[in-house]
Image (cartoon, rainbow, N blue to C red):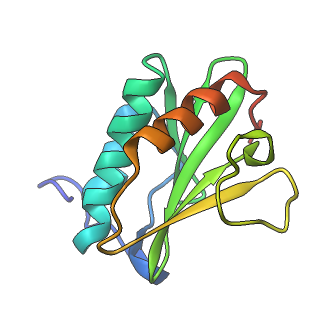
Amino acid sequence: MATATSKPVKLLTGGNPQIAKGYGDATVQTYIQAIPDWKQAVAIELDALITRAVPKVQKAVKWNTPMYGQEGNGYFVGFHMTTKYVKVAFFQGALLDPLPPETSMQKKVRYLHIRENDKIDKKQITAWVKHAAKLPGERM
C-alpha cells in the first residue's frame, strides 16, 4: 500500500512485495498490505495467528520475507509469497511434532504451503508456532 509520500511497492516473482529491510509491526504491515489477491488474506491470518500465539513476538522484514522471533532468541517462523502458494517456513521445523509437511534442503527447516482455497488449520499452525517459539531461533 502506498501513501501520498511513499512510492508504490514493487512486486517480485509470485507477487512477493519488495520491502526494504526493517523492524517492527509497521514494516510487516506494509509488506502485508502490498500483497496481491488471495495471498493477502492468508498473510493477514498468519500474522494474527502468530501474534496471538506469541504476544511479545518481534517482527521484521528481511529478504522480502516477514520474520517473527523473540528478543535474544532469533527468528522461529517466516512466510513468503510464491506464484502458487504462501510458503510458511519453520526454521526449526524438524523438531516440531507433527512435522510440517514440506521438506527443505536445510535439514532443520520445514515448510507449510498454503494454496488458494486451502482451509487454514488454525489449531495446528498455532501449535507449531507456540512450539517453534520455545526452540532456539535463527540469527539472521
Numbered disc total: 0
Where does residue 2 sit, x and y in percent of width and height? 20, 59
For residue 105, what is the image quadrant?
A: bottom right
Residue 62 sits above or below residue 34 on the image = above
The structure residue drawn at horizontal position 24% and vertical position 56%, both measured from the top left corner, is 6
Q: Is residue 76 left or right of residue 28?
A: right
The structure residue drawn at horizontal position 37% and vertical position 33%, both measured from the top left corner, is 25
For residue 92, what is the image quadrant?
A: top right
Q: Is residue 131 visible?
A: yes
Q: Nearer the viewer, residue 101 or 47?
A: 101
Residue 89 sits above or below residue 103 on the image = above
Residue 1 sits above or below residue 69 on the image = below
List the single residue furthest toward the front.
98
The structure residue drawn at horizontal position 77% and vertical position 36%, both measured from the top left corner, is 139
- The image quadrant where one finds the C terminus is top right
- The image quadrant where one finds the N terminus is bottom left
Q: Is residue 44 left or right of residue 51?
A: left
Q: Is residue 35 visible?
A: no
Q: Nearer the viewer, residue 68 or 113?
A: 113
List the single residue furthest toward the right.
107
For residue 136, what is the image quadrant?
A: top right
The structure residue drawn at horizontal position 69% and vertical position 22%, both measured from the top left corner, is 134
Where does residue 75 sit, x and y in percent of width and height? 66, 35
Q: Is residue 114 left or right of residue 106?
A: left
Where does residue 114 sit, x and y in percent of width and height? 45, 66
Q: Is residue 130 left or right of residue 83?
A: right
